[in-house]
Image (spheres, helix red, strand yellow):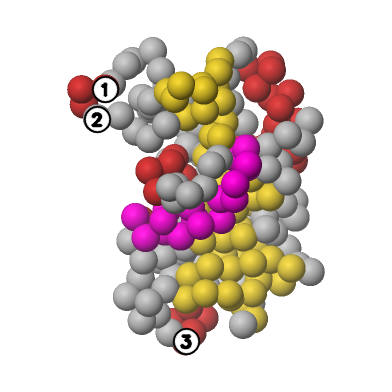
Amino acid sequence: MAWSREDMCKRASLELKNGFYCNLGIGMPTMVANYIPENVNVTLHSENGMLGIGPFPLLSEVDPDIINAGKQTITELPESSYFDSSESFAMIRGGHIDLSILGALQVSEKGDLANWMIPGKMVKGMGGAMDLVAGVKKVIILMEHNAKDGTSKLVKECNLPLTGMSVVNMIITDLGVFEIENEKIKLIEKAKDVSLEEIVSRTEANISS
């Protein structure tokens, strides 16, 4: 059985380590904040100028002035701090963020990432993804294994506009967990009851195990 989005976020949360400064990308990655283990102390960063992000608020806790980079309402913590976007991006570009968890449209065997636009479709802008993949120490991609039309999102070569080249370290999909080493994708964990044959059949890229 393939992992649900909740399962994927829980699995991604296990990659968070004590003392990490972590950025969660727009979309599914923001849900990881709800599954951080109680014994792990991490500080979540948002490009729009916030350190110390709590879980998503209950309806009674919603404050429209406290939002993340994806304009979702979030909660603050006693230790939360605020600053302008130039300082926020200085943290990213200066190598001070340990881990970024992002969504993706495609990831190639070499770790190339395409996640900011599909040609011909309206986009609001590239956002902070290009800075994140260039300045963050480790990049994890959290995404569905296949697109809505069934095509693989793990590909031999990206044919969508790139966000960064050779920047992805790990991929977590509904089928399993993959690492990229020496320009090769390695399967390190399968979702429960998902076979290697199913993963291979649903993947364009070459996979080793």
Along the horizontal axis of the image, is 41 left or right of 96?
A: left
Circle 1: element type: helix
Give how far apart the Cα atoms at labels 2 and 1 are.
5 Å
- Is residue 15 on the magenta stretch? yes
Residue 21 in picture, x, y percent from top left:
62, 37
Under mark 1, the amino acid is Glu
Q: Quadrant of residue 159?
A: bottom right
Cβ atoms at labels 2 and 1 below 8 Å apart: yes
Task: Say which amino acid is labelled 2.
Answer: Leu
Amino acid type for the residue under numbered disc 3 = Glu
Up/down of 72 relative to 142, above or below? above
Which residue position is annotated with label 1?
Answer: 61
Q: Residues within 10 Å of mark 3 (few under 14, many from 20)?
A: few
Residue at the spot of label 3 = 197
Which residue is located at x 66 percent, y 71 percent? 185
* Place of residue 120 in the rendered image (x, y in percent of width and height, measured from the top left): 51, 39
Q: Give the residue number, with chain letter if any, for mark 2.
A: 58
Question: Callout 1: few (<14), some (14-19), or many (20+) C-alpha neighbours within 10 Å?
Answer: few
Circle number at residue 168 = none
- From the viewer's perspective, is 26 left or right of 108? left
Q: Nearer the viewer, residue 160 or 110?
A: 110
Where is 39 relative to 186, above or below? above
Residue 116 position within the rendered picture, expressed as x and y whole percent measured from the top left: 57, 40
Q: Secondary structure at mark 2?
A: loop
Q: Few, some or many C-alpha atoms within 10 Å of disc 2 (few <14, some 14-19, many ≥20)?
A: few
Q: Is residue 92 above or below residue 106?
A: above
In magenta, the rendered stretch is 6-23
First of labels 1, 3 by sequence position = 1
Residue 155 is covered by the magenta coloring: no
